[in-house]
């Protein structure tokens, strides 16, 4: 019996069960670079290059190991008129008398629904495999969410630590605490020089892809002249080792820091590799736990890192499937302001925002605090349109896939799900940004002023946000302090802040 296995661009785990079960003599693997997938948002050129190159390397590796692989390059898909996954599969099923079709569960609703509809009309039996990009299966995660009124990450994380036994001793957390977040909030120290991430010289496969992407997706954001990412599992594992050796020991200390002219700090830069299946999240966590056991990294760094992967990453994926496709339409704060044009250029005088956006557009990367407390915070305070902001995040980042982008942007950053992900909005004035780093010293705006042409825009916008939503937040105990600080201000001070913030909101394009 001959089987056709479809593999998508984010299903590049060469050891996954769907591949292990294939019969090398009879079965075929189908992979393709498709217009629909590359263009449903203006994906960053770096992301397209990473995925196409990693797919081509994977196809080559599979062929070298004796598998039969049918691969459509972008040009071949276009010439054959194959734009979508359904068109691709139907086309391939006609080429050969396959007796079965197999696929791996898709990461997001859009494709999940397309594959569901497709398989219902095929006249061969179909088989669906779990996606191996996660520590827990989708079913297990849905089981954890089921019936919980307020399914918070911290509760899930404790459960996940107990299930995996990572950083546990006799069912108790190592060091006596599950969470060392309080030790992971050091501001940036400008005298520190973080080691750069490992670079990989593009080989001929990657060079071909870069040329294709530059030509075909010239109107998308992103630069490729300095593309040096891992494109195979072997390289991604080298990138992991490099991170563990050089950056993990200080990861915790500077996890929340904001550094001027520095977007990577001590972060791992591993998200894209894990999200497309090049790196196993289980292997990543095991390697990091081992570094702690061998005395190569302190507990606050290791726990902080494990919490991101075993905690946040698995949790947001579970939440995405738990909340269903309607989640994307939520807009609890009625945020509808259009995005300023500089979201697509980085051309704003707000130094923190300009650096975070420029790095996002050019490098397809910004670290978590830039995404949450700089760009996300600005979007939250100014009430930028939720769908437009989510689309922007989906387009610009190397690691962006809807299952992870949506809960982080709509839920965590924009509070548009009314507090399902975040127990309070991540709203902050410029004081927070100043406390965590050194952008403000080099900014055209003055962090200590709240109104006037020189004043840091985050300051007045923050108070206007609190004022605008005070009736919504009045019953949230975590917002009590902020509300009372606002209410204690004199009428004149309040009015001056509201007038100035209105002035700013009318001129977002020229900030
Ligand atoms: C508004 C917003 C949008 C985001 N969009 C994405 C996205 O599209 N894709 C994506 O992978 N991450 C997203 N994140 C989460 C996080 O910012 C990135 O995973 C992280 O910045 C990637 O860089 P890194 O690999 O250097 O991460 P590190 O700081 O080194 O963290 C280690 C790993 O933990 C995981 N991780 C950390 N935080 C999160 C989180 N909140 N959710 C899920 N995984 C997490 C990632 O796999 C990451 O590689 C978003 C966060 C925010 C606030
Ligand atoms: S002064 Fe305000 S806008 Fe400028 S860097 Fe600081 S927080 Fe950002």
Image (spheres, grey):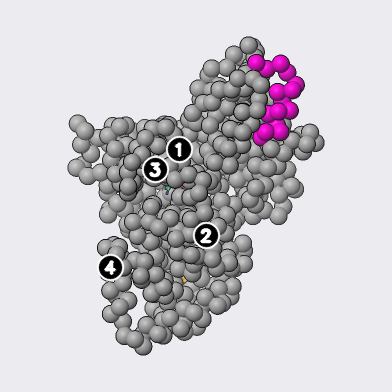
Quadrant location, ligand no. 2: bottom left
**How far across and down, in percent of the image, does residue 66 sit?**
63, 16
Q: Give the crowd class for mark 4: few <14, some 14-19, many >=20 residues within 10 Å.
A: some
For image coordinates 55% across by 68% down, the residue present is 337
Question: Residue 386: which numbered mark, if any?
Answer: 2
* Corner quadrant of residue 135: top left
Nearer-the-camera pick, 32 or 100: 100
Q: Secondary structure at mark 1?
A: helix
Q: Give the crowd class for mark 2: few <14, some 14-19, many >=20 residues within 10 Å.
A: many
Q: Secondary structure at mark 4?
A: helix
First to last magenta residue range: 85-99
- Which of the marked residues, 4 or 2, is nearer the chain's N terminus? 2
Q: CA distance from mark 4 to mark 1?
A: 42 Å
In the rendered view of the protein, which quadrant contains the N terminus?
A: top right
- Residue 354 to residue 316: above or below: below
Nearer-the-camera pick, 64 or 173: 173
**How far across and down, in percent of the image, does residue 192 sit?**
39, 57
Q: CA distance from mark 4 to mark 2?
A: 25 Å
**Which residue corresponds to mark 4?**
480
- In magenta segment, residue 194: no
**Which residue corresponds to mark 1?**
240
- Residue 12 to residue 388: above or below: above
Q: Residue furthest right?
A: 79
For image coordinates 67% across by 53% down, the residue present is 220
- Which of the marked residues, 1 or 2, is nearer the chain's N terminus? 1
**Which residue corresponds to mark 3?**
315
């Amino acid at each position: 019996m001959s089987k056709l296995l479809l593999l998508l661009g984010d299903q590049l785990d060469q050891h996954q069960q769907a591949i292990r079960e294939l019969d090398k003599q009879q079965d075929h693997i189908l992979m393709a670079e498709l217009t629909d997938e590359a263009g449903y948002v203006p994906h960053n050129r770096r992301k397209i290059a990473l995925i196409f190159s990693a797919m081509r390397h994977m196809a080559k590796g599979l062929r070298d190991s004796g598998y039969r692989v049918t691969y459509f390059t972008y040009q071949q898909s276009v010439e054959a008129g194959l734009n979508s996954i359904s068109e691709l599969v139907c086309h391939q099923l006609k080429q050969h008398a396959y007796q079965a079709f197999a696929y791996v569960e898709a990461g997001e609703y859009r494709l999940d629904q397309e594959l569901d509809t497709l398989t219902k009309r095929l006249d061969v039996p179909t088989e669906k495999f779990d996606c191996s990009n996660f520590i827990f299966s989708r079913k297990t995660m849905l089981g954890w969410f089921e019936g919980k009124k307020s399914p918070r990450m911290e509760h899930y994380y404790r459960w996940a630590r107990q299930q995996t036994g990572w950083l546990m001793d006799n069912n108790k957390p190592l060091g006596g605490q599950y969470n060392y977040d309080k030790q992971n909030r050091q501001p940036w120290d400008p005298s520190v020089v973080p080691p750069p991430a490992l670079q990989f010289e593009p080989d001929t496969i990657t060079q071909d892809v870069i040329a294709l992407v530059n030509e075909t997706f010239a109107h998308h954001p992103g630069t490729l002249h300095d593309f040096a990412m891992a494109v195979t599992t072997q390289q991604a594992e080298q990138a992991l080792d490099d991170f563990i050796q050089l950056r993990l020991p200080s990861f915790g200390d500077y996890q929340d820091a904001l550094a001027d002219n520095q977007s990577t700090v001590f972060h791992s830069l591993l998200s894209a590799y894990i999200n497309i299946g090049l790196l196993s999240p289980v292997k990543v966590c095991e390697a990091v736990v081992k570094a702690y056991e061998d005395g190569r990294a302190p507990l606050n760094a290791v726990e902080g890192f494990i919490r991101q992967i075993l905690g946040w990453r698995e949790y947001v994926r579970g939440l995405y499937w738990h909340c269903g496709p309607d989640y994307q339409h939520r807009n609890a704060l009625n945020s509808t302001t259009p995005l300023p044009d500089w979201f697509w250029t980085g051309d704003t005088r707000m130094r923190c925002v300009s650096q975070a956006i420029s790095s996002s557009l050019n490098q397809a990367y910004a670290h978590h605090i830039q995404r949450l407390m700089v760009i996300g915070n600005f979007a939250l305070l100014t009430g930028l349109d939720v769908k437009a902001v989510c689309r922007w995040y989906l387009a610009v980042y190397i690691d962006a896939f809807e299952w992870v982008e949506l809960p982080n942007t709509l839920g965590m950053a924009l509070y548009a799900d009314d507090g399902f992900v975040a127990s309070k909005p991540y709203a902050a004035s410029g004081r927070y940004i100043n406390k965590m780093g050194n952008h403000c010293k080099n900014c055209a705006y003055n962090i200590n002023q709240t109104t006037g042409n020189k004043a840091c825009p985050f300051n007045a916008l923050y108070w206007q946000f609190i004022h605008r939503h005070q009736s919504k937040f009045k019953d949230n105990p975590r917002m009590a302090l902020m509300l009372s600080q606002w209410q204690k201000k004199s009428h004149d001070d309040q009015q001056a802040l509201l007038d100035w913030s209105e002035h700013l909101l009318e001129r977002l394009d020229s900030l």
